[in-house]
Amino acid sequence: MTEIVMSQTPPILHGPSEKEKKYDRQLRLWAASGQAALESANLLLVNSGAGVVGVETFKNLILPGIGRFAIYDDALVEEADLGVNFFVDESCLGKPRSQCLTELLTELNPDVHGSWYPSEETAPSLDSLLATSPVFTAIIYTLPIAPERLAQLEAYGRQHKTPLFAIHSAGFYSYFRISLPGAFPIVDTHPDETATTDLRLLTPWPELVEFARDMTKDIDSLDAYEHGHLPYVVILLYYLERWKQTHEGRYPSTYKEKTEFRRIVQNAARADNPEGGEENFDEAAAAVLKTVVPPSLPSGLREVFDYTPSEPIEERSSFWIVANAIKAFHAKHKTLPLRGNVPDMKAKSSVYIQLQNIYKTKARQDAAEVLETAQSIAPGRQFDPAEVELFCKNAPFVKLINATKGVDSASSTCVNVLREVTAQELANDENAEITLSPLSLLPIYLALRATSHVASATADEILSSIEETIPGTKDHERIVSAAQEVARAEGGELHNIAALTGGMVAQEMIKIITKQYIPIDNTCIFDGIASRSQVLRL
């Protein structure tokens, strides 16, 4: 009897692994692929100044499980550190700050490996660390920083195509700046689900047309149940065809025509039922303005199509090969590969599943065509079909960050851009009271930038530095105020401002490491007095 019971016992269902339990919430955000990217990341923090904001950034990267990190900080722990940094204690006094920070940070997540420098045994200098360590995925450096050290990091970033993150926090002000080595494309941007509907009502393919015709060939004689469960896709296709017959083969294109078409759909609903109308026809009418649109090329994807890779490493990238394949697909079909998703709608389950399969089959066919084109562009190259399918699915939402080549922070190009943005922002401020727009936070950035290489400076010294970079600004009221506030801070960090800024930086780093979601482009300024932030491209 026991043997019979045992043989009939269903197999044990395995629950989530310990890692899945540990990282459950974040896996819902960036999935297993994003987590794998995090766990393979190797990050470097070059810490200087008060050294709080960089550590707070690392805290928010270690908790979600980055693979490895290193801290280079040649300061020793002093009394002042105990008041602002939660990752040192009294036992650390006189010890290398990098050692104490690493030891306490690794306690947050045993899965993360950390190392500290300078170390006489392995890397006594930053030069030796950069030369002997595996290539870093990204580098964070905190300001103020010595100019020669900054030049080392920028040279490393150019050589290894490594993103650099500069963070400066002083008093109530902070900013961080992302320097990408070149164009940085993101396919998995996680668009809003409501923006992803692509039903192709104006360019239907034969299978969809046949499906709609079969369901609506006797639409007027359908019983109440069948008529009330027609999917709104079918309803719109039917009445669009009727519209064409009375409008010289044209679809409704203007707002006036679409409003008239929507009224036709609304009037087609049957009212001789207990509900006094039909939900599926209400859905169809509500979807007219959003779905009755001709295919178009989104500006983000147009930027990708127009971009010409300038370096061999870019030309060999699978992203650009697949992008060229999709460009060829668009040139041939005048539309992008079908995404394949169908929104929820009132319909019989069997009919809805059939409609879903029609869209999914078409999406797979389009992706297969793009894959074939990519293989013809790069013969002998192996492409992951899942990667191609993801690109096709997200093609309308692909984003290219830093389409212009990255430049060093002190280059003439960077300074010219800063001058142009300053002129525009200050001009906008003059009209802010009229337009009810918030004032620009650029004066904060200018004041902090003036202390990028010195621990502290007087307000006059800060204003002189700003005037040297951007003539005619030293007497501007808001720039003077920002300079005075930065001078008052004397390079000191407030833990709450550093913690908040570190959280923002970690969020943007995760986007770049996982290549998911859209990171800022390229500078974020935070005003802790007004509790406000602003993103500018500088």
Image (cartoon, helix red, strand yellow):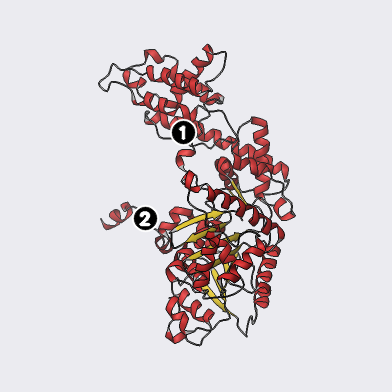
Q: Position of residue 135 (x, y in %)?
A: 64, 67
Which of the marked residues, 1 or 2, is nearer the chain's N terminus? 2
Could you tell me how many numbered marks the image carries?
2
Identify residue for label 2: 13
405 above or below 291? Answer: below
Position of 402 compared to 313: left or right?
Answer: left
Q: Position of residue 54 (x, y in %)?
A: 52, 70
Mark 2 belongs to which amino acid? Leu
Mark 1 belongs to which amino acid? Gln
200 above or below 61? Answer: above
Q: Please identify, in this view, whether the residue under mark 1 or under mark 2 is nearer the observer.
A: 1
Question: Quick one: 474 or 296, which is closer to the camera?
Answer: 474
For the point 68% across and 37% down, the residue is 328
Identify residue for label 1: 356
| Quadrant (top left/top right/bottom left/bottom right) for the C terminus | bottom right
For the point 53% across and 34% down, the residue is 361
In terms of secondary structure, where does tag 2 sit? loop
Marks 1 and 2 sit apart, C-alpha to C-alpha, by 30 Å
